[in-house]
Amino acid sequence: MFYRENGQFKTSYAADQQIFTIAQDKWFVWGLIAFAALAVPMLADEYMFRAILIPFLVLSLAALGVNLLVGYCGQITLGAGAFMAIGAYAAYNFMVRIDGMPLVLAMLLGGAAAAAFGILFGIPSLRVRGLYLAVATLAAQFLCDWAFLRIGWFTNYSSSGSVSVAKLEVLGWVVDSPVEKYLFCLAFVVVFAVIAKNLTRAAIGRQWMAIRDMDVAAEVIGIRPMFAKLSAFAVSSFFVGVAGALWGFVYLGSWEPAAFSVDRSFQLLFMVIIGGMGSIMGSFFGAAFIVILPIFLNQFLPFLGSLVGVTVSTAGVSHAEFIIFGSLIIFFLIVEPHGLARLWSIAKQKLRLWPFPH
Amino acid sequence: MGFFIETMLGGLMTGMLYSLVALGFVLIFKASGVFNFAQGAMVLVAALAMARFSEWSNAALGGDSLFLANVIGIIGAGAVMFLVAWAVERFVLRKLVNQEGATLLMVTLGIAYVLEGLGQTFFGSEIYSINVGMPKDPVIMFEGLVEGGVMINKEDFIAAALAAVLVGGLTVFFQKTAIGRALRAVADDHQAAQSVGIPLNKTWVIVWCVAGLVALVAGIIWGSKMGVQFSLVTVALRALPVVILGGLTSVPGAIVGGLIIGVGEKLSEVYLGPFVGGGIEIWFAYVMALIVLLFRPQGLFGEKIINRV
């Protein structure tokens, strides 16, 4: 009744081609951003920021990057964790080695370094597809795990192997309280989400999707596979690299290579699958789901156990987490291959017709 | 020289063990076109079941007959693997007939998580041991050839022999028997196989059972070498470059790939490692596989990949 495009007439091409063609969508997203920027800092407490909101924002940025590659260009990657690590360590090195390096610039340069490596490890994608490619990206993962552990130069020869950033400062604004960290991440995520949305609407995004749907056919109609695939790797790795820098600098503060292990890569891939492949919104749903589920299970399972008189141990909870994670992945792939984002769009479709059934 | 041969033989033995895990990958891929990421989890579950069933049977019967305990353990673990195969077919694969390879690949990641969780919930998550009475003492060989001879574990020999027997058996099974041919037909095309009267569901249960048994053998050998623990899952990640190198559709490829990777890893670690800080074996295998991929996308022994629009 309230959510429909009736009466919203487009009188110019620009108006017809905007991101949200329905005014209600536009207001909803503006409202969401305003809520996240203004209301959440007042409502949430410190635990919320540290345990849920900051990791959610950073991981949704990373999931967004992975989604560009997996969901839009159809190239499976199991090396996202490696590109997060490259982003984090490159940004760290820019900060440490260059005096007066601005924080944001260092992070973007970290992303650029990740993009360069993304292109390098994307080269096999020109020859191989599907799971062969997954193995090629795993090579990036193990190489990075090793390099950041064993080559001292990357960690500035720190004796413990862990690196840390002393002070986060942007143009005189010191980012130290959880609220400020949250807002800092939020700014990054909003800007990058807009970039991602526009990229996927533009020529380059359409090329990626053509490659995803059928690469041989895309080549026949004049899309250069090399450019399309490598650009997808570069853009995706850039996003993931910036997310890695945020993860290290803002969320962890000081970190070791284990923070970006192969488990992280799998986790990011799951976010994309559960959230919805080929959907910007889906990346956020997936990240929210995977960040919140373990916290929820940790609280909920012992409670459930106490109801039926069984004590659920910590190990039991972590095993249950494995089972529920795995089952959900199977469930989504069978029942809803387009993930939570698809449910969202079905709900919107229903809302347009409501209260009439047809 | 003696040291070189020893390193190389050590590499060959490790490679044989990788081959055992890689064999599981190849089997399922050959017969259903699914790349089974859950193979590592299957090895873990099989080894856990084996260790726990033999432990429980010892406790229940009160005896300490190693043979009886092991037989009960193997039967129990085999039953568990059958159950896994049946459940995977019934609840997962049956619903995903004719889906793309990538979807099936990701679904096996989900299966891996479920198996890891269930296995540890039922069988516990401590470190257990498997004792099938394999001799652990080393033997000295080639004394005439090199000075001082070369030291090898007897256990490794038995493992290698077992792997060889398995490979021989499986090759015959795939090439000569009716079921083997049916499995290959299913791998080529689900629909076409069904239309000539091959029961899809039954063949899938069979092949997952066979892969489960291979996982059991791998689990027993790895488990008796390094104890049954959660890190067995990572064995799958070590065996991945092996299948890529050897070719996904080739049983002999899994063996040759395993040997190449095993030897390459050990030699690189010993001779190249000291220069770059050590610990290079895991990525060295992957880089080797990557280089092969760039020149021969189908692996050394794989069937040529043809893309059709």
Image (cartoon, coloured by chain):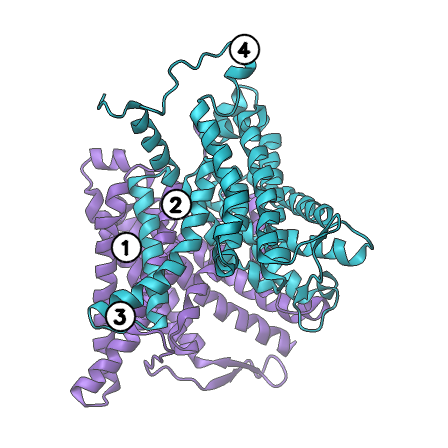
Chain colours: A cyan, B purple
Task: Name the secondary structure under disc 1.
Answer: helix
Residue carrying label 4 = A12
In the depicted structure, whether residue A72 falls above or below residue A89:
above
Q: Nearer the viewer, mark 4 or mark 1?
A: 4
Q: Amino acid at mark 4?
A: Ser
Q: Spatial distance from mark 4 to mark 1, Cα to Cα?
A: 59 Å
Looking at the rendered structure, whether the residues under marks 3 and 4 are on a common chain is answered as no
The reply, left or right, for residue A302 in relation to residue A126 is: left
Front residue (pair B192, B108): B108
> How many neighbours does mark 1 have within 10 angstroms: few (below 14), some (14-19), or many (20 or more)?
many
Residue at the farthest bottom position = B63
In the depicted structure, whether residue B197 falls above or below residue B232:
above
Instruction: State the quadrant of the N terminus of chain A.
Output: top left
Residue carrying label 3 = B122
Front residue (pair A132, B270): A132
Residue carrying label 2 = A274
Front residue (pair B101, B146): B101
